[in-house]
Amino acid sequence: MKRQIKIVILISILVFTTIISCSDNENIDSTAPGIVTNITVTPTNGGGIINYTLPSDDDILYVKAVYTNSLGEEVFRVSSKYNTSIEVNGLNQSTPVNVKLYVVDESENISQASQIDFIPLKSFIFLVQESINISPDLGGVKITWENIASKTVFVYVHIIDGTDETIRILSSNNLQESIFIRGLPSKELSFSTKVEDFDGNITELEDKGKHIPLFEEKIDKSTWTLVSAQSVNGNAYEGRTVNFWDDVVDTVETDADNSYFIITRDNNGGSLNFPLDIVIDLNKNVRIQRFKVWQRAYWYNGGGITYHYQEENLKSFNLYASNDAQTWNLLGQFDIGDPRDAAGNIPTKAFQEAIEGHEFSLPNTSDQFRYLKFSITSNYGSTSITVGSEITLYGLDNL
C-alpha cells in the first residue's frame, strides 16, 4: 500500500512539473525585434560612424554590426540600447565595405539585417606614418608623431648600423606623441618606420633618413657646491646635504657609506615645510635629458631590513634650472611612486629599482644652465625627517 502511495505521489510531481514546463515555454518570447531605420554613415580614417533609429521594441538589448575587415576576416562591433550609433573600424581600403546591422533583444532574438555600404577615409596609420619625425637627441633620437584618431598604433623603428639592424617597437594612442630611443652610439645611423593598427593593418616600411645621436655623458660632480642661502639644512646626525652629489650611493648592507642628507624639522624652523629646496651651483654649464635619484638604503637597528620606501625617504620632487640662481625654469615634476600594498609589503622589483636608482627623463632636452634646484615636495609620511642619498645627471658636460 505504501509503495502504491509513493508511486502516485511521484506521478503527480512529474505531471505538475510538465504542466509548469509547458506554461514556461508558452511565456518564452520568440518574436524577433524590429530593424534599425534611417541609417546614415560618416566615414572616418579607417572606419565609419553609423547612425540609426532604433525600433520601438521595449526589450532591445544591443545593436550588432557585422562586416568583413580589410584582412578578409568577419568581425563585429556592438552598441547598447542607450546609443543610436555604432563605430566600425580596422579598415584599410578605398573600396566599399558592406555592414549588416542587427537588433538583439533580451531574449536573444535577432532581427532581420539592415545594410549599408560606405567607403572609409584613408586609414589613420598612413597619417601617423606621414607625420613621424626623427631628430637627434642625447644618447639617441627623439621620435614624434600625430595620431588624429587617438587609437592604438604600433610604430616599428628600424635602425641600421652598417650591416646590423635593430628594431624598436613603440606603442601609443596619444593624439600627439614624443618618445626617446636611447642607448644608441654617437654615429650616423639609418632609420625607417612602419605603422600597424590594433587590427593588423600595416603600412610599408618608409625611409626616415640618417641621423647622428648626440654624445651623452655622465655629468661630473666634482665642481658642484651647495648654495646654502637658498637651501634647507640637511646636516643632521651623520647626514650632510653635500652627500647628495658625492658619487657614493647608500647601501643596505653596511653603514660604512652613510651617504645621504638628513633634513629635520628641528634644524629647519620646527617643521618640514614642503617644498624642501636643495640648490646646487654646478660651477659650469650643462644640458641634461635624464637623471637618476637614489633613496637612503641603510636602516640602523633594522636587522638587515632595507630603508627604501620608508616614511622618511623622499618621494616626489620638482627639478628647476637657472643661469643666475634667481630666475628658475621648471624642468619637470617627478614622483618615485609608492609600491607598498595595504599591509606595507613591497615587491622585489621595486626594491631592485631603488637599488639601481630611479631614472627619470625630461620631456625635452634642457637648455644650457648652471644652477640646479632639487625641490622635494613629499616623503612617504614622516612629519619630522626627510632623507635621500644621491643624484646623477646625464647629458652634455662643461659647455
Image (cartoon, helix red, strand yellow):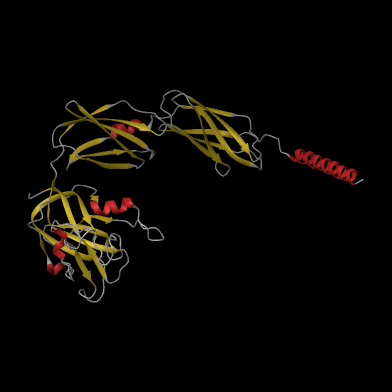
What quarter of the picture does the N terminus occupy? top right
152 left or right of 133?
A: right
* Of residues 241 and 362, the one drawn nearer to the viewer in this rendering: 241
* Residue lying at 12% horizontally and 68% vertically, measured from the top left: 228
36 left or right of 291?
A: right
Q: Position of residue 5 (x, y in %)?
A: 89, 45
* Of residues 267 and 193, the one drawn nearer to the viewer in this rendering: 267
Q: Position of residue 127 (x, y in %)?
A: 33, 32
Residue 324, placed above or below residue 269 = above
Residue sitting at the far right: 1
* Residue lying at 66% horizontally and 39% vertically, measured from the top left: 107
Count of marks overlaid on the render: 0
Q: Position of residue 39 (x, y in %)?
A: 55, 33
* Of residues 36 and 267, the one drawn nearer to the viewer in this rendering: 267
Residue 9, placed above or below residue 211 = below
Q: Is residue 326 visible?
A: no
299 left or right of 117?
A: left
Q: Is residue 249 visible?
A: yes
* Of residues 5 and 322, the one drawn nearer to the viewer in this rendering: 5
Q: Position of residue 204 (x, y in %)?
A: 31, 25
